[in-house]
Amino acid sequence: MIKDPVFWQLVLDLLLLVAILVLFLRIRRLVPSSLREVVSRLEILERLSEDLARYLEEERRIYARLERALRAGVQAWEGQEEERRTLREKVLGDYRQGTEVKEIARRYGLSEGEVELLISLERFRSRK
Protein backbone atom coordinates (compact mmCIF):
# COMPACT_ATOMS: atom_id res chain seq x y z
CA MET A 1 0.00 0.00 0.00
CA ILE A 2 1.14 3.53 -0.79
CA LYS A 3 2.03 5.57 2.26
CA ASP A 4 2.96 8.80 0.56
CA PRO A 5 0.65 11.53 1.88
CA VAL A 6 1.07 13.59 -1.30
CA PHE A 7 -0.29 10.72 -3.39
CA TRP A 8 -3.36 10.40 -1.17
CA GLN A 9 -3.81 14.14 -1.19
CA LEU A 10 -3.79 14.08 -5.01
CA VAL A 11 -6.30 11.21 -5.05
CA LEU A 12 -8.60 13.04 -2.64
CA ASP A 13 -8.23 16.26 -4.65
CA LEU A 14 -9.14 14.40 -7.85
CA LEU A 15 -12.17 12.81 -6.16
CA LEU A 16 -13.21 16.21 -4.90
CA LEU A 17 -12.86 17.72 -8.38
CA VAL A 18 -14.94 14.90 -9.87
CA ALA A 19 -17.62 15.43 -7.22
CA ILE A 20 -17.63 19.18 -7.90
CA LEU A 21 -17.89 18.55 -11.65
CA VAL A 22 -20.81 16.14 -11.18
CA LEU A 23 -22.62 18.62 -8.92
CA PHE A 24 -21.93 21.44 -11.36
CA LEU A 25 -23.42 19.46 -14.26
CA ARG A 26 -26.49 18.54 -12.26
CA ILE A 27 -27.02 22.10 -11.08
CA ARG A 28 -26.48 23.41 -14.61
CA ARG A 29 -29.30 21.18 -15.87
CA LEU A 30 -31.63 22.27 -13.07
CA VAL A 31 -31.00 26.00 -13.06
CA PRO A 32 -32.42 26.95 -16.46
CA SER A 33 -35.74 25.21 -15.81
CA SER A 34 -35.81 26.55 -12.27
CA LEU A 35 -35.09 30.05 -13.51
CA ARG A 36 -37.86 29.74 -16.08
CA GLU A 37 -40.20 28.57 -13.36
CA VAL A 38 -39.17 31.43 -11.06
CA VAL A 39 -39.65 33.97 -13.85
CA SER A 40 -43.04 32.46 -14.67
CA ARG A 41 -44.13 32.63 -11.05
CA LEU A 42 -42.86 36.19 -10.76
CA GLU A 43 -44.93 37.14 -13.80
CA ILE A 44 -47.98 35.53 -12.22
CA LEU A 45 -47.33 37.38 -8.97
CA GLU A 46 -46.93 40.64 -10.85
CA ARG A 47 -50.30 40.14 -12.60
CA LEU A 48 -51.94 39.25 -9.29
CA SER A 49 -50.40 42.34 -7.70
CA GLU A 50 -51.77 44.53 -10.49
CA ASP A 51 -55.21 42.91 -10.16
CA LEU A 52 -55.13 43.47 -6.41
CA ALA A 53 -54.17 47.12 -6.89
CA ARG A 54 -57.10 47.61 -9.32
CA TYR A 55 -59.44 45.82 -6.91
CA LEU A 56 -58.33 47.99 -3.99
CA GLU A 57 -58.75 51.16 -6.04
CA GLU A 58 -62.27 50.09 -7.01
CA GLU A 59 -63.03 49.32 -3.34
CA ARG A 60 -61.79 52.80 -2.36
CA ARG A 61 -64.10 54.37 -4.94
CA ILE A 62 -67.05 52.30 -3.74
CA TYR A 63 -66.27 53.16 -0.12
CA ALA A 64 -66.10 56.89 -0.96
CA ARG A 65 -69.45 56.72 -2.79
CA LEU A 66 -71.01 54.80 0.08
CA GLU A 67 -69.69 57.30 2.60
CA ARG A 68 -71.13 60.21 0.58
CA ALA A 69 -74.48 58.42 0.25
CA LEU A 70 -74.61 57.71 3.97
CA ARG A 71 -73.76 61.31 4.80
CA ALA A 72 -76.50 62.52 2.45
CA GLY A 73 -78.94 60.01 3.95
CA VAL A 74 -78.18 61.17 7.48
CA GLN A 75 -78.69 64.78 6.49
CA ALA A 76 -81.96 63.95 4.75
CA TRP A 77 -83.14 61.91 7.73
CA GLU A 78 -82.30 64.65 10.19
CA GLY A 79 -83.93 67.25 7.95
CA GLN A 80 -87.21 65.33 7.82
CA GLU A 81 -87.70 64.84 11.55
CA GLU A 82 -90.71 67.17 11.66
CA GLU A 83 -92.25 65.44 8.66
CA ARG A 84 -91.82 62.03 10.33
CA ARG A 85 -93.43 63.30 13.54
CA THR A 86 -96.34 64.75 11.59
CA LEU A 87 -96.75 61.53 9.57
CA ARG A 88 -96.77 59.45 12.77
CA GLU A 89 -99.43 61.72 14.26
CA LYS A 90 -101.54 61.47 11.10
CA VAL A 91 -101.24 57.67 10.99
CA LEU A 92 -102.18 57.35 14.66
CA GLY A 93 -105.02 59.86 14.31
CA ASP A 94 -106.50 57.95 11.37
CA TYR A 95 -106.14 54.68 13.29
CA ARG A 96 -107.93 56.14 16.31
CA GLN A 97 -110.75 57.23 14.02
CA GLY A 98 -111.16 53.61 12.90
CA THR A 99 -109.46 53.72 9.49
CA GLU A 100 -108.13 50.31 8.45
CA VAL A 101 -104.39 49.68 8.39
CA LYS A 102 -104.50 48.93 4.67
CA GLU A 103 -106.18 52.25 3.90
CA ILE A 104 -103.77 54.19 6.12
CA ALA A 105 -100.82 52.56 4.36
CA ARG A 106 -102.20 53.42 0.93
CA ARG A 107 -103.03 56.99 1.94
CA TYR A 108 -99.52 57.81 3.19
CA GLY A 109 -97.44 55.60 0.90
CA LEU A 110 -96.32 53.25 3.65
CA SER A 111 -96.33 49.49 3.91
CA GLU A 112 -98.89 47.86 6.16
CA GLY A 113 -96.03 46.63 8.33
CA GLU A 114 -94.81 50.19 8.88
CA VAL A 115 -98.27 51.33 9.89
CA GLU A 116 -98.67 48.37 12.24
CA LEU A 117 -95.28 49.11 13.75
CA LEU A 118 -96.24 52.73 14.46
CA ILE A 119 -99.48 51.57 16.06
CA SER A 120 -97.71 48.92 18.15
CA LEU A 121 -95.12 51.41 19.36
CA GLU A 122 -97.87 53.81 20.38
CA ARG A 123 -99.67 51.05 22.27
CA PHE A 124 -96.43 50.12 24.03
CA ARG A 125 -95.78 53.75 25.00
CA SER A 126 -99.32 54.21 26.33
CA ARG A 127 -98.98 51.12 28.61
CA LYS A 128 -96.06 52.62 30.49
Image (cartoon, helix red, strand yellow):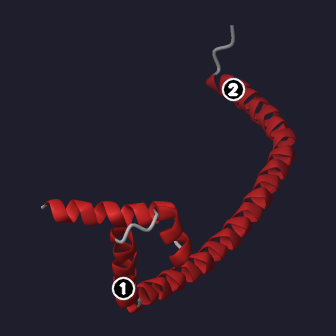
Residue at 36 percent across and 72 percent down: it is 97
**With respect to residue 105, does 24 lie above or below?**
above
Left or right, 123 with reference to 13: left
The one nearer the camera, 19 or 100, is: 100
Q: Nearer the viewer, residue 2 or 127?
A: 127
Is label 1 in a helix, a strand or a loop?
A: helix
Name the residue located 86 percent from the left edge and 45 percent from the top edge: 33
Question: Where's the C terminus, which quadrant?
Answer: bottom left
Report the residue that reaches farthest toward the front. 98
Does dot 2 land on a helix, a strand or a loop? Answer: helix
Question: Quadrant of the rendered structure where residue 63 is?
Answer: bottom right
Q: Is residue 43 above or below residue 34?
A: below
Image vertical order of residue 21 relative to residue 76, above or below: above
* Measured Cα–Cα span from mark 2 to mark 1: 103 Å
Amino acid under label 2?
Leu
Q: Position of residue 73 (x, y in %)?
A: 48, 83
Q: Earlier in the sequence, mark 2 or mark 1?
A: 2
Residue most extreme to the left: 128
Residue type of the residue flagged with mark 1: Thr
Q: Would residue 7 be found to the left or right of residue 24 on screen?
A: left
- Please provide percent x and percent y for residue 30: 83, 40
Checking the image for residue 49, the label placed there is none
| Residue at position x 80%, y 60% in the image | 43
Q: Image quadrant for the N terminus?
A: top right
Contact between labelled residues 1 and 2, with CB atoms less than 8 Å apart: no
How far across and how far down the image is residue 101, in percent?
46, 63
Q: Residues within 10 Å of mark 2 (few under 14, many from 20)?
A: few
| Image mark for residue 86 | 1
Is residue 73 found left or right of 5 in the rendered image?
A: left
Q: Which residue is mark 2?
A: 12
